[in-house]
Image (cartoon, rainbow, N blue to C red):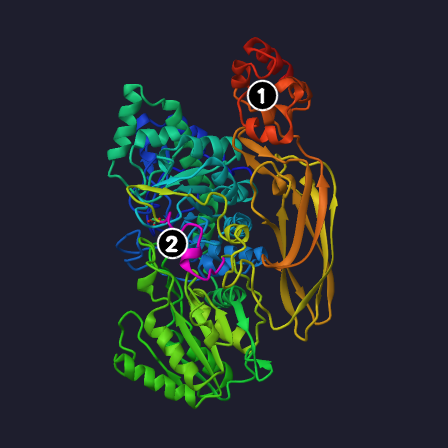
Amino acid sequence: MTIEETTEAPAAAGSGAAAQGAATTAGRAFDVERVLAALTLEEKASLLSGLDFWTTQPVDRDGVAVPGVMVTDGPHGLRKQAETPDHLGLGTSVPATCFPPAATLGSTWDPALLRRVGEALGRETRVNDVAVLLGPGINIKRSPLNGRNFEYLSEDPVISGELGTALVAGIQSQGVGTSLKHFAANNQEADRMRVSADVDERTLREIYLPGFERVVKRAQPWTVMCSYNKINDVYASQNHWLLTEVLRDEWGFEGLVVSDWGAVRDRGAAVAAGLDLEMPASGGRTDAEVVAAVRAGTLDEAVVDVAARRVLRLVARSLPALDAAAASGENFDVDAHHALAREAAAAGTVLLKNDPVDEAPLLPLASADGVAVVGELARTPRYQGAGSSQVNPTRLDDALSALRTATGAEVPFAAGYTVDGADAGSGTDAAALLAEAAEVARAAGTVLVFLGLPASYESEGFDRAHMDLPAEQVALLEAVAAVNPRVVVVLANGSAVSVAAWRHLAPAVVEGWLGGQAGGSAVVDVLLGAVNPAGRLAETIPLRLQDNPSYGNFPGELGHVRYGEGLLVGYRWYDARQADVAYPFGHGLSYTTFAYDGVAAEVLRPASGADDTTADDAVVRVTVTVTNTGERSGAEVVQVYVGDPESQAQRPERELKAFAKVDLEPGESREVTLDLVGRDLAYWHPVLRRWVVEGGEFVISVGASSRDLRGSATVVVEGEDVRLPLEPLSTVAEAMAHPVVGPRIQALVHGGAVAEDMLGMIGDMPLTVVADFGMGGFDRDGLTALLAEANG
Ligand code: BGC
């Protein structure tokens, strides 16, 4: 994607007024290169930080008129603050559609839907005169305890990258920008502004970076937001390797890097590392530091020019859409966006369990006759998380009213518990609330029990202390189940909660996540069967927190968090250990059933780790026929996992590499084709420091979840013969495996008498030691000659 720049003459006047909330005027376009050439060092430095909390600095003087533009949170709705600004969602903001947060969007596994959500977000951004929506957030869910997991899509980089791409493309199709965040390895809130994420490069490349890489390469976000934390002791904001070598030089990022709010410690180092725009305003302090660094000769003015150019381009590329929106006075369709929010929330709802009771599952509900609702969250929904992403919704649906409206039934209700200490209406005495709910449940045919995490449990700024629901909510479920076996639990939470202790009490469990402003009606759509659930878990629900791979290494201490589990994040860990989980990654039931037939994989051409994005890069074509074998139309998410059992490197058992959501009518069959590129087979070689595809066998598994594989095919792919150069410290075993000198060394060591059992003892001995001990029939000079021959 190329950056749109205009060649129109600089606007004469009025553009300095483009600060927060100001009406825009037509004709503000300017020529980036001409302006840049005309700016003083001080003016260029001023462009590199904010004017205030949300606006870039304007330049307005004779002959130069660069407006400031507004950037604003994000990610699942616009948080444009009209009055007091803050980055924690404390102050009020203009009404905007609160779409479901990322935890819910991630569970849709539906890029086409997220593209439409993105378009709506982009429209709201544009008509509100905002140039950049600060999102999406695509950090990997390393631990269920991360207080901000609700803002992130998945524990898996393919899901995060695919869905992130769709959101970015959708938002930017409206002429405004995005900020892909938080780059990178920001996987906890504890100590988030200082902590060093200590993580090896292979794990970064295979788990924590590829989501970003995919979005950058496929959708070119206008901006990337660096994270607060350090990565291996270097602040993300000052990390030249991350912000310049990886992001720009390797991935081809064309946009601007903005700091997270307050993430910059050393402004000169940050500019040099590739951090273009510091937010929010520093009151001119850091602008002066940049000027001083240039004058002192420690920062090249050309580097300042590069960053200033990127800010100018950002402003220039946003003006056409903002000015057109202001001129036309367009607005967004509140009803249509609410309807889309409802569709997205229903699509992200995951039916975890739907066991038969008296031979039939409880869901979908045949009608509301005899149905009772308990749980305060049915009446007072928790629909988004706290912090900078908190949107002021245009309206708010609650499940209780939605159920009553949809069915016309007078559905009995009891609060059962209070949320965050609020008065539930009949007093806050826990025992009385419980007794009242049990009474309502006893009289009902089926009971819908709404449970979930209160806002005080999960938020930006701190991590969760445990994975459990509040004890009073579990007590409510026990009280209800004791008097009525027909129990449906409906959950509201931004990240996995433990279910093992109570799920046997509920034949049906619906994971509604945080549904956004229409979450209440969306979950009712699913309960009543108006929508057939097709959400799939984008994060594993473990049996116990202690089973989670980061346990013991989260959230770290003394300023460091060690990513000790390496590549084995989420399902990769549980699969490696063959450990039971409550609900596996990719799981989600439907009101219909699907059959998989004829899983096949065809190799199209040799593979290389450099092939990663385009359809032309396809190396393996996977096909499977999926049939809707039930009586309702529904959607299945076909998941393709790849394993490399013969690799020299330790690799996860299997990894998600492709997926497709397919709508099928009852009885309908469809052949689904999914292509894998070289990168889907590759691993990051830590010594060669590049992607490699080792030639050989790969196992391609196709299924309905990571633990419900319905078929597999083994393919042999021509790839690299991955081999490191031999050196004096190479071992006997490594040398023997070498195709050129291996047989010679075999013949030399111990006079060719290295039997299998002997190899076990000396296999790990370095060649130089063999030479020194005289065990190899070669001395050091002989070894040098052998190595020269081996390495060509
Ligand atoms: C958050 C960002 C957010 C920014 C501005 C920071 O605290 O980490 O995600 O965009 O504030 O509100």
Would you name the residue on which mark 2 appears? 146
Towards the viewer: 329 or 210 = 210
* Figure label count: 2
Q: Position of residue 587 (x, y in %)?
A: 56, 62
Q: Residue at x 43, y 53 (%)?
A: 326
Instruction: State how far apart marks 2 and 1 are (Cα).
Output: 44 Å
Q: Which residues are magenta?
A: 540-554
Q: Which of the numbered marks, if any, corresponds to residue 347?
A: none
Q: Is label 2 within 8 A of ligand 1 (CB to nearest ligand atom)?
A: no
**Residue bearing the label numbered 1:** 726
Tag 2 secondary structure? loop
Residue 79 pos. (x, y %): 37, 56
Looking at the picture, does residue 610 appear above or below residue 72? above
User: Can residue 715 be seen from the camera position used here?
Assistant: yes
Image point 52% across, 55% down: which residue?
119
Q: Nearer the viewer, mark 2 or mark 1?
A: 1
Front in this rendered view, residue 211 or 546: 546
The crowding category of the residue bearing disc 2, from other C-alpha atoms within 10 Å (few below 14, some 14 to 19, many at least 20), is many
The secondary structure making up most of the magenta span is loop
465 over 414 or under it: above or below? above
* Residue type at tag 1: Leu
Q: Is residue 602 left or right of residue 319?
A: right
Q: Is residue 728 visible?
A: no
Question: Can residue 553 be found in the magenta stretch?
Answer: yes
Give how far across and how far down residue 419 sits, in percent: 31, 72
Where is 607 relative to 166, above or below?
A: above
Q: Amino acid at mark 2?
A: Asn
